[in-house]
Image: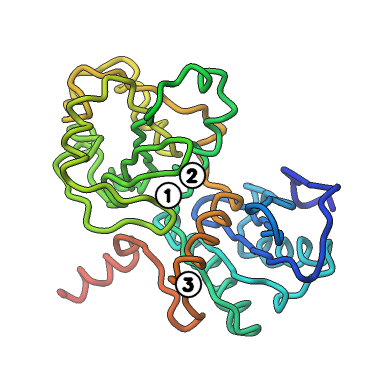
Amino acid sequence: MGGLFKVVRHNRFQRYTMSARWVLAIEASGIGGSVALLESPLVGGLVLVEQLVLPADRGSVSTLAPAVDAILRARRLRVSDLAVIAVTAGPGSFTGLRVGLATAKLLGWAASKPIAAVDSLAAVAKRFQLALPASSASQSRPAGWRAPLVTIVNAFRKQVFTASWYVDAEGIQPVRPSVVVDLSDWLHDPWGAEKKLTSEPVGARPLVAQQVVAEQQEVDQPVWVSGSGASLVSAALVEGADQVQSAVPSRGVAWRLATEELWQPMAEQVGHLGWQTLLAGRAVDAAALQPNYLRASAAEEKRRVASGS
């Protein structure tokens, strides 16, 4: 499988059986996107079988459907063989999200398959979390170690989509759910200490308010930042600019940027979170699938202003 799509990972030695449970994952919240096929064997956890990266110079309108077809055909699978279809529901690019959601809806409707809507910022956090064991520093981490993480995506119009988390070897814990805020407000409060956790994406372990307060007082390690929006704030965070005045886990804490290759959500992480959504009983049918745009598009806002509503 080559040419149009970049194969990121291909497990050639995985044994495939029709009794296995398959997850098709779609990530199209930004430019390009990716498609992944994961397997839940009869014994063991979820395994990435293959992941295709869509070309960034071509819209997902023309590349997503062929990628889905290619990744299924390579395993001689049909949509009816899937256990669930996982897809990013937002926040992110309106065009990309609509293409991804429409594709997932069509597949789910045609084969009567459940669909798991995944928060794109949770997928960024999950990618950061899955990369932790690869760090040599992991061997020196004390018991109970966790990393404060802020995920951020450029929402344009001087705004960003953002969420904050605690990340450890077991998973991701939300502190602030995905919201859209002005960039200036984000610089004032990147961690989101002034926001209360009202809900959490599936696959994340919730924190109680008392635990958040206690850990904000105790944590003295760097706060990590990941996501495509990190490029907007990297200078302010790295240089410790005065406008960054957050009530972060501890005053004066250092900020660190995650490796740039981890900034983009990938279908592999969408698949992991989607599988957890299915197991939690929160997958939906095609008719019930809804986007999580967080705000109206520029065109919709213009029409609203013009109509006076």
305 vs 235: above or below: below
- Badge 2 is on which residue? 126
**Separation (CA) of disc 3 from disc 2:** 19 Å
The spot of residue 113 in percent (x, y) is 60, 79
> Tag 3, which secondary structure?
loop
> Tag 1, which secondary structure?
helix
Q: Nearer the viewer, residue 254 or 65?
A: 254
The spot of residue 233 in percent (x, y) is 34, 29
107 vs 229: above or below: below
* Disc 3 residue type (three-letter): Ala
Q: Residue at x 53, y 72 (%)?
A: 115
Looking at the image, is mark 3 or mark 2 earlier in the sequence? Answer: 2
The spot of residue 261 in percent (x, y) is 57, 33
Please tell me how crowded label 3 is: few (under 14), some (14-19), or many (20+) other residues with Cα within 10 Å: many
* Disc 2 residue type (three-letter): Lys
**Separation (CA) of disc 1 from disc 2:** 6 Å
Q: Which residue is drawn at 53% across and 19% down?
A: 139
Q: Which residue is drawn at 65% across and 64% down?
A: 24
- Numbered circle sitting on residue 284: none
- Badge 3 is on which residue? 283
Relative placement, left or right, of 128 versus 59 is: left
Residue 252: image quadrant is top left
* Disc 1 residue type (three-letter): Ala
Q: Which quadrant, please, contains the C terminus? A: bottom left
- Badge 1 is on which residue? 122
Relative placement, left or right, of 94 versus 114 is: left
